[in-house]
Image (cartoon, grey):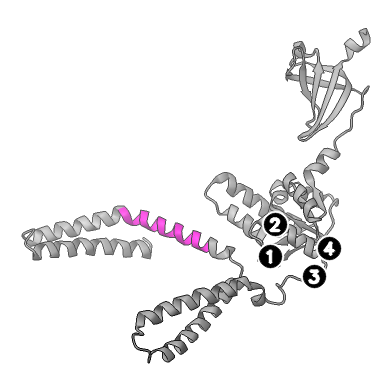
Amino acid sequence: MTVLRAILLATFTYLGYFSGQILSYYGLIGGKINVIYLTLAGLLTGLLLAPRLEYLYRKMVRKAEEAWNRLPPELPLAVTLATTVALLLAVLLTTLLSSVPGFAWYHSLLLTVVLIVALSAVAVRNLHFFQRDGNRRSSEKLGGKALDSSVLIDGRIAEMAELGWLEGPLWVPRFILRELQMLADQEDPVRRGKGRRGLEVLERLGKHVDLEVIDDEVSDQDLTDDKLLDLCRTRGMALITNDAAMVQLARIYGVKALSIQALSIALRTQYRPGDRVELEIIKPGRESGQGVGYLEDGTMVVVDGAARLMGKKVPVVITQSIQTQVGRLVFARLEEEGEEG
């Protein structure tokens, strides 16, 4: 039994005993045996509720710790300093105003609250003055490439590094690490798995390329994507991502973006009209008589007149290749029909 659960159990037991004493004092129950019964009822209630209350308490503490870890390290320092100055000013003003008729303690309290809120707001808006020299945003260009959470969760970048296709320096902002850590601590197994996979990919990358964590904080940005793009623009870094929306935002910010997904599409075999391949027909197409198959790289091929050949591997001739938003779409015809024609 944990200390917290023991304290809760003792508390409920005492509440049962105390309620019995109160009821007995006012004559609502008679006999000491009823006090014992209420004490036992408190004990049983504690046995039932203590584990649940302990779970809720630990959950609240974990969420509070996560929220605290998300805060920039300079924020508590700024608020603490602002509160200290506000209290000193409150002491001075209370001393000066104490001789004013009608000035009471609650006026002093109100004045103190106003000073704390006002000075804390000023400190937060000027948070960069409280940052250490190593953490201040600098105009120094670092170069290299910054990684976002999507490319780390995807994982293919680790294989590129292991094969020697990726060179450093690679930079991982501290707020991206916090994002992965938050995902890894989630109760949802899917989100938790993504976070842990991202951290594992970081560990693999560190063994093959020059990988460093950068502590720059972009305090005037709220969204993680905006923070990352602003950091890349300030530090002169390229961005490696697997998010198509981030690639578009990077163009707006003037940041060079490298997409793993776009690279994988570009590396697929380029088929041209007249090329012959063997293809297994998997399912019917949208139009009547069409069959659909897939190349080894996952490219979908629509074959005219192949619906009757589902489940068979047949030779086809490429007739057209179209690049769409979701990838490349290839059209083909049966080779036997071309020979007959």
- Looking at the rendered structure, the kind of residue marked 2 is Asp
Which mark, by number, is residue 226? 2
Q: Is residue 114 magenta?
A: no
Mark-to-mark CA distance, 2 and 3: 17 Å
Which picture quadrant has residue 290? top right
For residue 135, above or below residue 158? below
> Badge 1: how crowded within 10 Å, few (<14), some, or many (20+)?
many
Local SS, label 2 = helix
Mark-to-mark CA distance, 3 and 4: 12 Å
Q: Nearer the viewer, residue 226 or 203?
A: 226
Which picture quadrant has residue 225? bottom right
- Range of magenta residues: 49-65
* Tag in front: 4 or 1: 1
**Mark earlier in primary sequence (2, 3):** 3
**Mark earlier in primary sequence (4, 1):** 4
Q: Residue at x 83, y 63 (%)?
A: 143
Give the residue number, with chain letter if any, for mark 1.
218
Q: Is residue 227 left or right of residue 70?
A: right
Asked if disc 1 and disc 2 are in contact, CB closer than 8 Å, the reply is yes
- Looking at the rendered structure, the kind of residue marked 1 is Val
Q: Residue at x 49, y 78 (%)?
A: 115
Give the residue number, with chain letter if any, for mark 3.
139
Asked if disc 3 and disc 4 are in contact, CB closer than 8 Å, the reply is no
Give the residue number, with chain letter if any, for mark 4.
143
Q: Nearer the viewer, residue 102 or 104?
A: 102
Asked if disc 2 and disc 3 are in contact, CB closer than 8 Å, the reply is no
**Mark earlier in primary sequence (1, 2):** 1
